[in-house]
Image (tube, rainbow, N blue to C red):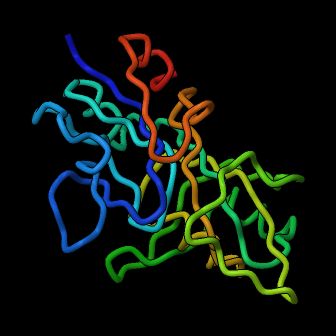
Amino acid sequence: MPQYFIFHKPFQVLSQFSAEGDKKTLFDFFPGISKNIYPVGRLDFDSEGLLLLTDDKTLTHQLLDPSFAHPRTYWVQLEGTITEDAIQQLQQGVTISIDGKKYRTKKAVAKILKEEPPVAERNPAVRFRKNIPTSWISLTLTEGKNRQVRKMTAATGFPTLRLIRYAIGNLTLDGIAPGSYKAAGDEIKELVLA
């Protein structure tokens, strides 16, 4: 019977079990977990949010193979007050650099969040500058290039300050505090692949 864990990865934790210097890893949160459980994809050390761990190789393949193009939604705090023009650019796709080559991102769903999403305080906190406002957006992608969200927002002139993966398909972080996880059953496939 496959195992599934929905983990809220905190800031400055590696999306791996193996040690790397003195950085925290998944092992700090899952010390006795089976050696067959792996994270599906990754979140950067400085990103937060939903990370799915499983030993289900079929689901892992479906989530990592770009041809399935499943949606992933991010809450992104930006430096500056984002404009409708920048939102349209994100929706249409922007040109970023991947491995030194220009790459045009696929169309995305981007929305300005009128209020800050219900997120826990980050430790350490995001730098605060009184004379530079920040804004929040929701960005849904169907692809996952290295540091793509950060590169996309920078390309529109609004650097990312905080990045939280809120959802994979219909599976969300709701009710899971940073550093916590919950086990799930087979119904997870319907949520993730919806």
Q: Is residue 155 above or below residue 111?
A: below
- Location of the N terminus by quadrant is top left
Query: On the rendered structure, is 118 left or right of 35?
Result: right
Residue 22 found in image quarter: bottom left
| Residue 140 position within the rendered picture, expressed as x and y whole percent measured from the top left | 62, 47
Q: Is residue 23 above or below residue 80?
A: above
Residue in front for this viewpoint, 160 or 61: 160
| Residue 6 position within the rendered picture, expressed as x and y whole percent measured from the top left | 42, 32
| Residue 43 position within the rendered picture, expressed as x and y whole percent measured from the top left | 40, 56
Residue in front for this viewpoint, 107 or 166: 166
Residue at the extreme bottom: 131
Q: Give the residue at x 70% y 76%.
A: 156
Residue 188 found in image quarter: top left
Residue in front for this viewpoint, 17 or 52: 17
Q: Give the residue at x 55% y 34%.
A: 176
What is the count of numbered marks? 0
Residue 157 found in image quarter: bottom right
Query: On the rendered structure, is 47 left or right of 127?
Result: left
Q: Is residue 112 above or below residue 159?
A: above
Query: On the rendered structure, is 40 left or right of 56?
Result: right
Q: Is residue 169 above or below residue 43?
A: above
| Residue 185 position within the rendered picture, expressed as x and y whole percent measured from the top left | 37, 12
Q: Give the residue at x 78% y 69%.
A: 86
Q: Give the residue at x 80% y 78%.
A: 80
